[in-house]
Structure formats: C-alpha cells, structure tokens
Image: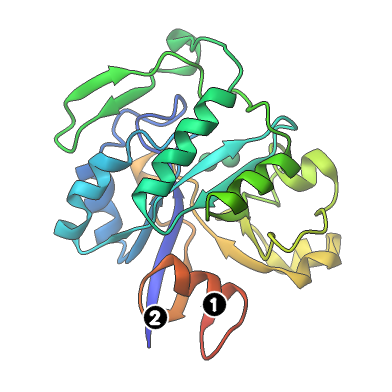
Amino acid sequence: MHWYKADLHIHSVLSPCGSLEMGPRAVLSTAKQKNIDLLAITDHNSAANLPAFAALATEYEIVLIPGLEVQSAEEIHTLVFFHDMKSCQAFSRELYDSLLPVKNEPDFFGDQVVIDSEENILRYEEKALINSSRWNFEQLLGKINSAGGFALPAHVDAHSYSIISQLGFIPESKDIVALGITAKCDVNDLYKKIPGLKDFCLIRNSDAHYLKDIGSGTTEFYLKEPTLHEIILACKQKGDRYIKI
Ligand SMILES: [Zn+2]
Ligand SMILES: [Zn+2]
C-alpha cells in the first residue's frame, strides 16, 4: 500500500477558459514539481486532448486517469473518469453529439485547441465546448453507468455550475459516492451549511486553468496501486484504503 497525491481536475488548452500555456509538457512538469502522482485532464465536454498527455505521462512518472468535465442540461458540472482511454474517448464522442449546436466565439471565450504531445496544433474545435449537453443530470448518470465511468459531481461548494447551486440537493443515487470540492473549500464550514454531505467522500482538486494553480487543491489516496479502480474502492471505504483532503 502507498500514499498517492492526486489532482484530478485540470484543464488543458482545449478548454476555452484554459490558458494557452496548458500544454502537455508544461502541465506534466509542473505537476511533477508539485509531487503529484495521479493526474486527470478534465476539459469541458471533451477528451480530445488526452492522447497528447497520455503520450508523455509515463516520462514524468505520472499516472493519467482518463476523464472530462461534463456540463449537463441543468448546468451542473460533473467530472467523469474512466478505467481506460478507449471508453473515455467513446463517451466523449457520444457526449459531443449531445452538445447544443453552438459555435465557439474565440474572441469572447478563447480558442479551443486540439494539440499533439509536442504542442503542434492539430485542429481548432469549432463547437462551443463551454455549452451544456442536452442530457439532464439523471440521463448523464445513466450514460456514465453504461459506459463504465465514475461520476464525481464537481466543486459542490462553488456558487455556480455545481449540483448544489443548480439543484440545491444531492439526488439519491447509488452512482454518487463522492463529491468534488474546490481548492479553498473549508470542509467544516461546508458540513455546517449542508450536513447531508457527510454521507459522501469528498475529493479536493485544483480545477487549474493556469499552470500556477496546478496542485493548489489535492487529495491523498492510500491505495494498493494508482488506478481508478483503487480510487473507487477508497471512496467506498473498502479495505485498508484511506483518503486525506
Ligand atoms: Zn466546473
Ligand atoms: Zn473545471
């Protein structure tokens, strides 16, 4: 068993709000400096930049958990993680078709850049990734379940785009065992405001859009090995696995 430091919510250059400095080498080397072992690139509604990061992750001795950040019809942000890249890409393609057919406005939102591992620009994504999917939250949970993914409603303590800000409660579902919190979240304060959150495992991440923010919010996992399977078992408090936020 080992402790692994994780930051499972980071945006790349593909996210319109993500800085153009968020390329694979810069992100991975910054994460390495912050002693991060487990990292997830979670762009808005797309996993198109994951191959570029996957190609370099082992060079930096960092384990990349395939994932993305979905915006449902209610404007709830949910991180979705997968055991393998293939399932993640298949889910990303299905999600893409469910996005509202709105074009990105680069001058207003920023460019959405798909790159390779050496930061060559492969294409500009033209559909606005910052928009919502037509799937509502319940439908999304069903899609995640059938795709073999793991749902982590993102930044539940945030005042916008969180399940609490949009619904005001956590819907009862066997598919929600953990919740994401922001880097600055005061957990005692959060429990005072919403005692029901004590029933869930909390995972703190940075939600970095700039290099300087990588590792500003992390979670440490005590696991047999650095895999999503083990993270899920830790969230479900199985065996001698622990989580420290
Ligand atoms: Zn978000
Ligand atoms: Zn985010």
2 vs 1, front mark: 1
Seen in the picture, residue 115 relative to 33 is either above or below; the reply is above
Q: Residue furthest front?
A: 146
Q: Position of residue 177 (x, y in %)?
A: 67, 66
Q: Identify the amino acid type marked 2.
A: Trp
Q: CA distance from mark 2 to mark 1?
A: 12 Å
Q: Nearer the viewer, residue 131 or 243?
A: 131
Q: Is residue 215 visible?
A: yes
First along the sequence among labels 2 and 1: 2
Looking at the picture, how far across and down is residue 113, in whole percent? 32, 23
Residue identifier under label 2: 3
Res 234 label: 1
Q: Residues within 10 Å of mark 1 (few under 14, many from 20)?
A: many
The residue under label 1 is which amino acid type?
Ala
Which residue shows up at 53% across the image and 82% down it? 242
**In the displayed structure, would residue 10 be above or below residue 237?**
above
As drawn, is 167 to the left or to the right of 4? right
Task: Report the residue at 47% width, 63% height from top.
Answer: 218
Whether residue 22 is situated above or below residue 33 in the rendered picture: above
Mark 2 surroundings within 10 Å by alpha-carbon count, few (fewer than 14), some (14 through 19), many (20 or more): some
For the N terminus, the image quarter is bottom left
Q: Is residue 244 visible?
A: no
Residue 233 spot, x, y in % from top left: 54, 76
Q: Tell me: is circle 2 under 8 Å from ligand 2.
A: no
Q: Residue at x 69, y 66 (%)?
A: 187
